Amino acid sequence: MDQIELQGWLDELRIEHRDLDVVIDHLIEGNHHDGLRIARLKRRKLKLKDMISKLESELIPDLDA
């Protein structure tokens, strides 16, 4: 995968991460009592954060080379 593809994928993951933030906040503020759904969304958000971090590290040039 080249850098342009990685950057595009990274952008999509960041958008999904922000969208999940909005949904989770809405559910919590709206006093929805579906704790399982909120927990699943939070787990998905955490997975996205990990994927974003991994992709960001792949996009940073190796300074030792």
Image (cartoon, rainbow, N blue to C red):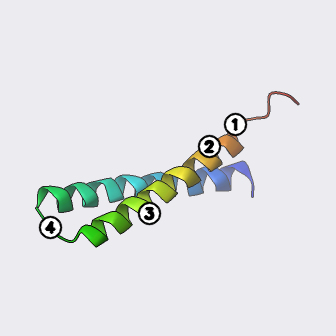
Give the residue number, with chain letter if any, for mark 1: 60
| Residue at 67 percent of width and 51 percent of height | 4
Q: Report x, y in % for residue 2.
A: 74, 53
Asked if labels 3 and 4 touch by Cβ distance under 8 angstroms, the answer is no
Which of the two marks, 4 or 2, is nearer to us in this view? 4
Which numbered marker is on residue 32? 4
Frontmost residue, 26 versus 15: 26
Q: Report x, y in % for residue 33.
A: 16, 69
* Kind of residue indicated by mark 1: Ile
Asked if labels 2 and 3 touch by Cβ distance under 8 angstroms, the answer is no
Distance from disc 3 to disc 1, alpha carbons, whole Å, reads 25 Å
Left or right relative to 18: residue 5: right
Give the residue number, with chain letter if any, for mark 3: 44
Asked if labels 1 and 2 touch by Cβ distance under 8 angstroms, the answer is yes
Q: Earlier in the sequence, mark 3 or mark 1?
A: 3
Which of the two marks, 1 or 4, is nearer to us in this view? 4
Which of the two marks, 3 or 2, is nearer to us in this view? 3
Distance from disc 4 to disc 3, alpha carbons, whole Å, reads 18 Å
Distance from disc 4 to disc 2, alpha carbons, whole Å, reads 34 Å
Structural crowding at the residue carrying mark 3, measured as other residues with C-alpha within 10 Å and reported as few (<14), some (14–19) or many (≥20): some
Q: Earlier in the sequence, mark 4 or mark 3?
A: 4
Q: Secondary structure at mark 4?
A: loop
* Kind of residue indicated by mark 3: Arg
Q: Is residue 65 above or below residue 16?
A: above
Q: Residue furthest top?
A: 63
Structural crowding at the residue carrying mark 1, measured as other residues with C-alpha within 10 Å and reported as few (<14), some (14–19) or many (≥20): few
Which numbered marker is on residue 56? 2
Q: Report x, y in % for residue 32.
A: 14, 67
Q: Report x, y in % for residue 42.
A: 37, 59
Structural crowding at the residue carrying mark 4, measured as other residues with C-alpha within 10 Å and reported as few (<14), some (14–19) or many (≥20): few
Q: Earlier in the sequence, mark 1 or mark 4?
A: 4
Which numbered marker is on residue 28? none
